[in-house]
Image (cartoon, coloured by chain):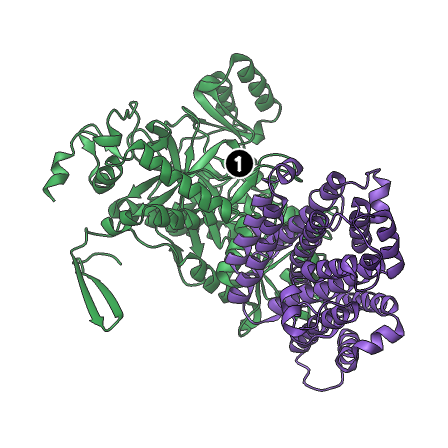
Chain colours: A purple, B green
Amino acid sequence: MLSRHADASFWIGRYVERAEATARMIDVHYHFGLESPLVGEAMRWSSILAISGQEELYHEKGYEEDERSILYFFAFDLENPSSIATCIRLARENGRSIRDQISSEMWKCLNRMYLQYQDWDLERVLSGSPFAFFETVKEGSQLFQGVANRTLMMGEARDFHDVGRFLERADQTARILDVKYHDLLPDFADHMAKHLAPYATSEAGSVGGPVDVHGWIAVLKSVGAFEAFRKTFHQGVTPSRVTQFLLLNPQFPASVRHSVGRVDTCLRRISGNRDVAPVNEAERQVGRLYNELNYMRGEDIITAGLHEFLEDVQDRCNKIGDAIYRTYLRF
Amino acid sequence: MNQEQNNSTPAGLFAGYDTGGFFDEMFESSGPRPHYARLARTLGSLTAEEFRARCQLADLTLVNQGITFTVYGDTKGVEKPFPVDLVPRVIPSDEWALVEKGLSQRVRALNLFLHDVYHDGKILRDGIVPRDLIVNAPNYRRSFVGADVPGDLYVHICGTDLIRDEKGTYRVLEDNCRTPSGVSYMLENRLILMRVFPSLFSENRVRPIDHYAAQLLHNLRDLAPHGREDPNVVLLTPGVYNSAYFEHSFLAQQMGIELVEGRDLFVDDNVVFMKTTRGPRRVDVIYRRIDDDFLDPLVFRSDSALGVAGLVNAHRAGNVALTNGIGTGVADDKSVYPYVPAMIRYYLDQEPILEQVPTYMGWKQDDLEYICDHAHELVIKATNESGGYGMLIGPQAARQELAEFVRNVRSNPRNYIGQPLISLSRSPCFFDSGFEGRHIDLRPYILCGRDDVTIVPGGLTRVALRKGSYVVNSSQGGGSKDTWVIAGELPVETTQTQTMGRMVQTQTSFAAPVGGEQ
């Protein structure tokens, strides 16, 4: 396969996944805010900015931290490299450049997603139900992934697409956890509790209190994990359980461990390597991270410091992307 | 079948259709032509509203598949589907047989001509074609004299534009021997029509065209140097921003070959490679959709970022085949066009089967005077422009426009030709209110293989959608139609259905017409 084609395939996977992740993130925050008068707007929106890593650009552009600006920035601003509009547009551009490599159903799906997206603007999102808007984006991404699964040959194009998709997913899950963890630190919750009396009791602000639980439920919902989590843990939502679930659960499709495992499998299928030892830098890095996740326990992470661990995962996802580029995609 | 005789005057949706005194493809004075009879009945029985609904379905299909062009801007550019008119153009089998024979003859002569002018130049020495005209032609590649190409074939894919005059006679308007485009629209139009009007295809015996890509791939593989087994054939595109990009990706997909850009290729030791995830892979045949000028910055335009440095030398060394060959532009030069009948007589010792359009050549003194004096009656064309650019339609031009164009001609006569305005045949097209006649042409795609010339039945019918316009190019407001070649005789259909449990197999067999064609 041409390196340029592999590159485009990889990025289609990443961009579609990223569009969905961004939509999920805003969606959940939006509804979290509606459900929970305990939390002010600023908290919701500042954490979204932190997750995306776009704080600097956002402030450079002189936007206020309010609902309108944040929604515009993440849904429609083409200068924001991870806005939904940018992701959908670039996924389609990449699709166009390898139309002959992907199935025509996939192209049609990308094209339609793009065209339908052009019908949306900020006014329509705000005047109608933002819920319908986020739903459209999520369903567009899911439809595309389903169509890809069903129609794309089990070959390199598909493997590179999946590598992109799962690498992005691992990264997004780690990111969302990192920022929410930061938001939901007990002292922050305490602060909220004090300022939001009389709604909040002192209990509401402590770890495991209502604000806290609510925040962690939002984290779960944003990665589509709430129901799966409930089925796995019957005892209730706690930070360490959520962390463990999203990082280490082998069966949940958006857990970091599962996602990294999928990247590992795809890379090995691409190289045809059946040996335990890696044959290139990309395999070495992915394999190493995957094995660490396989042998790790929830308490190990907490002991070592969750934030440090999550930063390390994000950093390594970057390095993996870089190694894949240097091994296969450079042209 | 008796109904067909009752169709003497246009009925239903065709009622009041005006042929406007032109040669109409569908209707003669007594009613629909026989090969259009069933179509006239079926389409005529629809209401305008029903027809509009089919048009919308067709548009939606085009938009969803991204068969669109961008109207303006990019970031939020409006994309529109290429206009397809849903009334097919029908060619009866006897007319097609003549066209097919004429085009095969023509493209054979053109290939012999190209081989000749890049080798011995016999036709020039014998004074049949003026030497000056050829060696000074802008697309004559002097550096290619003496170079041998596989099978001595230069033009592997030729798109020849045919028009029909007021009597319905087919005439060649021009040949496109460089990188003719539009074949994807021919194929897509068929798919659209089958989707929108499936019943038409069960009523008419339309000859299939979907083997085009397979035939093209077969021919391309045949060109592989050193008889390499399972050669690597690629399609070289200028990239996504090229207006024909859809076609490039469509063809690559249909043939199952890689669609490459210049930056995917490199040349090492006169061998072409592409950069893959598994390292360099050798390339044997390149179907290039890039003009000569941009092909290789070392040989042609050094500022070209689209091409591949060293490609031309690799080609000369016989390590990679190029389709079409380099330097074919000298054969479709508009000032060489008047000599094609002479080429046919010279190389093939045959009379040309297809008529041409009488042509006055700017470089001949008498002709030049005629062009300038009769500019208001002529179509004047720059010899090396295409796409409907650099062209003046005298009878439709304003006085000032005429004067300006004549000045251009005088200042560079070699660059211009003049032809009488042929009133192109018309075909009904659907507009919101009903059918109206519009001028059309026909571009069949001729494939020249090592063994044989193949033409898929039909081609691309282009339509000048603007009322009264003679310009069919898509860049100038043109659209297109599905083009049908009807098989020999009307089918005597016998259908047999076998039922086995839930499995149903339908077999359709046509009684073979005696001496009929496939």
Circle 1 packing at 10 Å, graded few (<14), some (14-19), many (20+), is: few
In the displayed structure, does residue B158 sit left or right of residue B171?
A: right
Residue A177: name its quadrant. bottom right
- At which x and y percent is residue A75? 69, 45
A133 up-or-down from B288: above or below: above
On-image quarter of the N terminus of chain B: top left
- At which x and y percent is residue B208? 33, 55
A108 up-or-down from A282: above or below: above
- At which x and y percent is residue B217? 48, 62
B437 up-or-down from B327: above or below: above
Report if residue B267 is visible in the image.
no
- At 49% across and 47% down in the image, what residue appears? B123
- At which x and y percent is residue B222? 49, 66
- At 26% across and 48% down in the image, what residue appears? B93
Tag 1: amino acid: Gly
Task: Please name whichever residue, A128 or B17, is drawn nearer the observer in this view of the structure.
Answer: A128
On-image quarter of the C terminus of chain B: bottom left
